[in-house]
Amino acid sequence: GTTGGPLLNMILRPIGTGAFHCGVEVHGWEWSYSDIQGSPDHVKSGVFSCEPKCCEGHTYHETIFMGRTRLKESEILSLLTAMEKEWRICDYDTITRNCCHFC
């Protein structure tokens, strides 16, 4: 997906760069990290899930196969729950701590 807009990425993609959204699909869900603008004050984690290839505000472009997990879905959810403490909304940074770093 794109965060920088289709025109920006059309220019930057041929030289191997761009402004992209990144998510990891596992057990039928796409997981990622964002500063999630408009989240209620009680929401501290920037970790979120959505239907694969359907992240709101982004345009799907491609899938890169990274292998399969041996973890059960319950183990993945436990891992993500633990990661939520380290991936807080307030720590998000467009350049140094974003969805690509999370993935």
Image (spheres, helix red, strand yellow):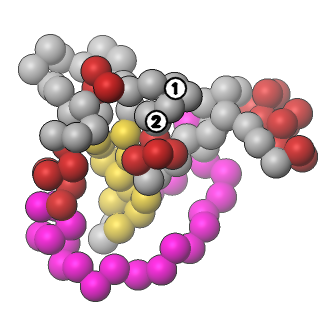
**Residue 44, percent from left and from top:** 17, 27
**Residue 34, percent from left and from top:** 39, 32
**Residue 26, percent from left and from top:** 35, 67
Taking the spot 14% from the left edge, 52% from the top edge, the residue there is: 82
31 to 91, vertically: above or below: below
80 to 89, vertically: above or below: below
| Residue 59 shows up from this direction | no
Q: Quadrant of the N terminus?
A: top right
**Residue 78, percent from left and from top:** 12, 61
Amino acid found under the numbered disc labelled 2: Asn
Q: Are marks 2 and 1 in contact (CB under 8 Å)?
A: yes
Tell me the number on the disc at residue 98.
2
Amino acid found under the numbered disc labelled 1: Thr
What is the span of residues highlighted in magenta in the rendered image? 51-78
Quadrant of the rendered image containing residue 84: top left
Callout 2 secondary element: loop
- How many numbered circles does the render carry? 2
Task: Measure the C-alpha gap from mark 2 to mark 1.
Answer: 6 Å
Furthest-front residue in this view: 96
Could you classify mark 2 by the number of other residues whose Cα lies within 10 Å: few (under 14), some (14-19), or many (20 or more)?
Answer: many
Tell me the number on the disc at residue 74.
none
Callout 1 secondary element: loop
Q: Which residue is mark 1?
A: 94
Could you classify mark 1 by the number of other residues whose Cα lies within 10 Å: few (under 14), some (14-19), or many (20 or more)?
Answer: few
- The answer to whether residue 57 is magenta is yes
76 to 20, vertically: above or below: below
Taking the spot 48% from the left edge, 80% from the top edge, the residue there is: 67
Q: Is residue 2 left or right of residue 45?
A: right
Q: Is residue 45 left or right of residue 97?
A: left
Q: Is residue 96 left or right of residue 6?
A: left
Q: Main secondary structure of the magenta part?
A: loop
